[in-house]
């Protein structure tokens, strides 16, 4: 593989950039995830292990992750996947799969079609289905996944038995479960066993933990919207489970614009 070329990422006044930024530009992961990869001792520069986040690199440095040299990717990808149940959204799972080969990875649904190193923006747990973004653009991932982006994510949750009718209103006011406070932006009843929930900054397994705190079991949990992105296609059909599509240039620009506008409103 060729040496990581960072020239395009350097301005005229600087000769070096931060290692995590270089990794993000190479499509390794988002900047935040790249920081974790560095501190885990998985990155080397010119053959030397690097664990310090303040490390800077130049266009001439040879950078490796898990012993494999990385390079700048010229094609930026922005992909919306309708993830099936049973697939894990985790790069760390991919790294450890040689020891535990049992789990399916969501990224495997894309690998036959893309040579770029893609990674998920945010998470969707193994037992949930629905929309999730994949990219190799670290800047895009950093903006979209940052809490200040206030990007709405909409879910349909179905319980195995009827849930209390007051649950959506209580969720909007806030619920404390095991010392953690959970509050959705919006929730409403659809039927005695189905509700719609909109989250802004979803904590780990937030909906599941809230529902289960009422001694209820979730039958299905599906993410149907990210910002203005839904499973509906231009021809009126729906993106099938397990299928994916690339975002248009306008959609990429519009979702970044939406995130930046939301950030400005919170300042």
Image (cartoon, helix red, strand yellow):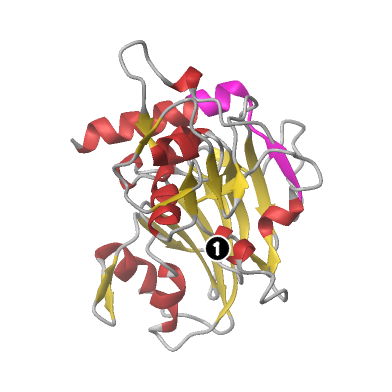
Secondary structure of residue under mark 1: helix
Residue furthest to the top: 12
Q: Which residues are magenta?
A: 243-253
Residue at image point 58% right, 50% down: 132
Q: Is residue 167 above or below residue 144?
A: below
Residue ID for mark 1: 92
Q: Quadrant of the C terminus?
A: top left
Q: Is residue 266 above or below residue 254?
A: below
Closer to us: 83 or 11: 11
Image x and y of residue 31, in percent: 41, 43
- From this viewpoint, which residue is outermost toward the left? 267
| Left/right of residue 200 with respect to residue 222 in the rendered view | left
Choose between 17 and 242: the one closer to the eye: 17
Residue 260 sits inside the magenta stretch: no
**For this rendering, which residue is in front, 81 or 207?**
81
The quarter of the displayed image where residue 249 is located: top right
Q: Quadrant of residue 221?
A: bottom right
* Residue 228 in the figure: left or right of residue 231: left
Quadrant of image for the N terminus = top right
**Residue at figure coordinates x 61%, y 72% from the top left:** 127
Mark 1, Cα crowd under 10 Å, few <14 / some 14-19 / many 20+, is: few
Q: Quadrant of residue 161?
A: bottom right
Residue placed farthest to the bottom in the image? 215
Q: Position of residue 56 (x, y in %)?
A: 35, 35
Image x and y of residue 164, in percent: 41, 80
Instruction: State how many labels appear.
Output: 1
In the current view of this chain or complex, which residue is farthest to the front? Answer: 47
**Residue 144 x/y as whole percent:** 43, 40
Answer above or below: position of 151 versus 261. Answer: below
Magenta highlight on residue 245: yes
């Amino acid at each position: 593989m060729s040496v990581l070329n960072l020239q395009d990422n350097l301005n005229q006044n600087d000769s070096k950039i931060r290692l995590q930024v270089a990794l993000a530009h190479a499509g390794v992961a988002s900047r935040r995830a790249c920081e974790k990869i560095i501190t885990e001792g998985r990155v080397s520069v010119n053959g030397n292990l690097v664990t310090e986040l303040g490390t800077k690199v130049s266009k001439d440095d040879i950078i490796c992750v898990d012993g494999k040299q990385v390079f700048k990717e010229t094609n930026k990808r922005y992909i919306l996947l309708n993830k099936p149940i049973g697939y894990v959204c985790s790069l760390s799972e991919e790294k450890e799969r040689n020891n535990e080969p049992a789990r399916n990875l969501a990224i495997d649904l894309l690998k036959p079609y893309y040579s770029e190193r893609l990674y998920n923006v945010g998470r969707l747990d193994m037992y949930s289905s629905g929309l999730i973004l994949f990219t190799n653009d670290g800047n895009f991932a950093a903006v979209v996944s940052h809490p200040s982006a206030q990007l709405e994510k909409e879910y349909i949750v179905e319980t195995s038995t009827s849930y209390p009718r007051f649950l959506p209103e209580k969720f909007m006011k806030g619920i404390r479960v095991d010392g953690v406070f959970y509050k959705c932006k919006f929730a409403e009843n659809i039927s005695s066993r189905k509700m719609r929930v909109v989250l802004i900054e979803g904590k780990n397994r937030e909906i599941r933990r809230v529902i289960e705190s009422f001694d209820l079991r979730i039958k299905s949990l599906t993410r149907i919207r990210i910002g203005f992105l839904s499973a509906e296609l231009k021809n009126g059909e729906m993106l099938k489970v397990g299928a994916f599509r690339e975002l248009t240039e306008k959609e990429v620009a519009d979702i970044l614009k939406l995130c930046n506008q939301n950030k400005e409103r919170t300042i």
